[in-house]
Amino acid sequence: MTTIICSTTGCLREKIRYFDKETPLINIIVREQGANRAQNRPFSSMVSSSSSHQAVMSEISCMETKASSPQTCNEKMLANYVPIYVMLPLDAVTADNVVGDRDNLEKQLKELRAAGVDGVMTDVWWGIVESKGPKQYDWSGYRSLFKLVQDCGLKMQAIMSFHQCGGNVGDVVYIPIPQWVRDIGESDPDIFYTNRKGNRNPEYLTLGVDNKPLFHGRTAVEIYSDYMKSFRENMSDFLESGFILDIEVGLGAAGELRYPSYPETQGWVFPGIGEFQCYDKYLKEDFKEAASNAGHPEWELPDDAGEYNDTPDATEFFKSNGTYTTEKGKFFLTWYSNKLLNHGDQILEEANKAFLGCKLVLAIKVSGIHWWYKTENHAAELTAGYYNLNDRDGYRPIARLLTRHHAVLNFTCLEMKDSEQSADAKSGPQELVQQVLSDAWQEKIEVAGENALSRYDSAAYDQILLNARPNGVNKAGPPKLRMYGVTYLRLSSYLLQQTNFDLFKIFVKKMHADQQYTADTDKYNHHLVPLPPSKPKIPTEELLESTKPIKPFPWNKETDMSVSGGGGEGGGGLFGFITRLFPWNR
């Protein structure tokens, strides 16, 4: 029998023929051991081995005849490479400060590495590390986790998680903030975000106490700063080795720069507009002072913005020509969103000081609040602190702020399409992603992203691939637009089920632009340099200048690197057909 495997994408132009009546076709196309080993062994050894499960496309990507120059081709295509990370389980380190189910996790990590995944991301929970008392840090669980991940050949993105685990969409683990902080909240519940009815949210400290020395003589910002400094001191070996590439700084609920406006623990359900979270005494006082300074001491915080599960039109604040369009409403929304910006700015400056000189990047996460995006009021975004309207950009000021700290903007809901959402929610995830990513690129900063909900289907993967390279790959060098990286949410037994994982491995390959896994970040133009100091503070007026809407960059209608058909090798055509017809044995 003669089997012909032929590809015309990239630099593979030759036909590879096998003459072997005894070798099943499926065994011919399954082998991958990483970039270095692939280049150092004969192709015949790849054919004879069938114990590994990565598609052969990773092995033969950009292979050519000896007369040509595969190295040049690889270098050009590598400029399109987008590294892919996988979020670890929420309890990778348990509340008892030990690695959870270590043997199983090690097995899973090795499967990720064999699939070509670049690294993993994990929450570094404040509620675990500083649980015993102020400045009593115990990093032992995370040192064990980091060593395990490092030994499995993966890189690390570490989140400074100053929020509670539990209460957000997808949370199945409960890790509260430290007990000694919650004890302070017993006597002073205003340290927590509060809605108009007075309901407290212990997930994260209100930004109203950022500079209040209420925590055994320390302010909230000083707590966060000390925590990050201790992390650097205790993880210096991992930082110096280049194992930790990214420090994401938690700035609010779910680790995101936002107010906790849609808490499931208080009864919110999709697509409720949420509620403003500024009714603790500290933020009330701040608003009254700001209003008085503006010549309106009579102004109060909104009392007409509805409840968590209202629709915009059911409220006086968000209805057509409602309060949000008035002078009072605009003043409040500017104050509310500016407080969030200042909160992020101040903590990022402390993060910059803590990690100054480390070869890594800082990042923050911005939430993808896509429901009610296709309305004039953008109600759900406004309650979360994103003052974004059709005639006002609420995200470019965040991007501009990040230029000061040399930080990456990490955005969510990359997998979502408008057509998948309920028409009643007036959702616009595709337009939202396009706006936020364009804002970041217009401000000359890097942008990363992740999926909002766990998905294992080709439609979700293709949408992520489209957003990762909105104008497709460029076979001659860097693409017009390219995300800095994508983190897949999250590692689980469902992801590793045979059918799901087979498709995920193709997704990884497509993220890498059909190139083999590359450990050297310089080869795909991620030049990690010592983190420089933050630039001078950006005046508020200059930040507000960036609220003027701009036209987003154009997006292709679909990715040219589909996991299920067309656009490059492996996803469609013969390889795609075979992977669907004959699932690989694991």
Image (tube, rainbow, N blue to C red):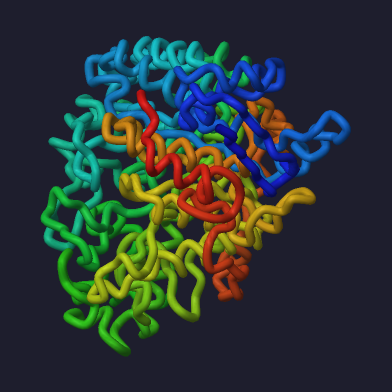
Residue lying farthest to the right in this orientation = 67
- Residue beneath the point at 42% across and 22% down: 111
- Residue beneath the point at 40% across and 10% down: 144
- On the question of residue 250 being in view, the answer is no
Where is residue 19 shown, x and y percent of the image?
Answer: 61, 27
**Considering depth in this image, is 26 or 509 the residue closer to the camera?**
26
- Residue beneath the point at 31% across and 67% down: 371
Label tally: 0
- On the question of residue 525 being in view, the answer is yes
Where is residue 280 shown, x and y percent of the image?
Answer: 23, 53
Quarter of the picture containing the N terminus is top right
In the picture, residue 319 is in which quadrant?
Answer: bottom left
- Residue beneath the point at 53% across and 35% down: 350
Instruction: Check the image and report above or below for 432 versus 560.
Output: below
In the picture, residue 427 is in which quadrant?
Answer: bottom left
Instruction: Check the image and report above or below for 409 versus 241.
Output: below
**Considering depth in this image, is 367 or 195 the residue closer to the camera?**
367
Where is residue 468 shown, x and y percent of the image?
Answer: 55, 52
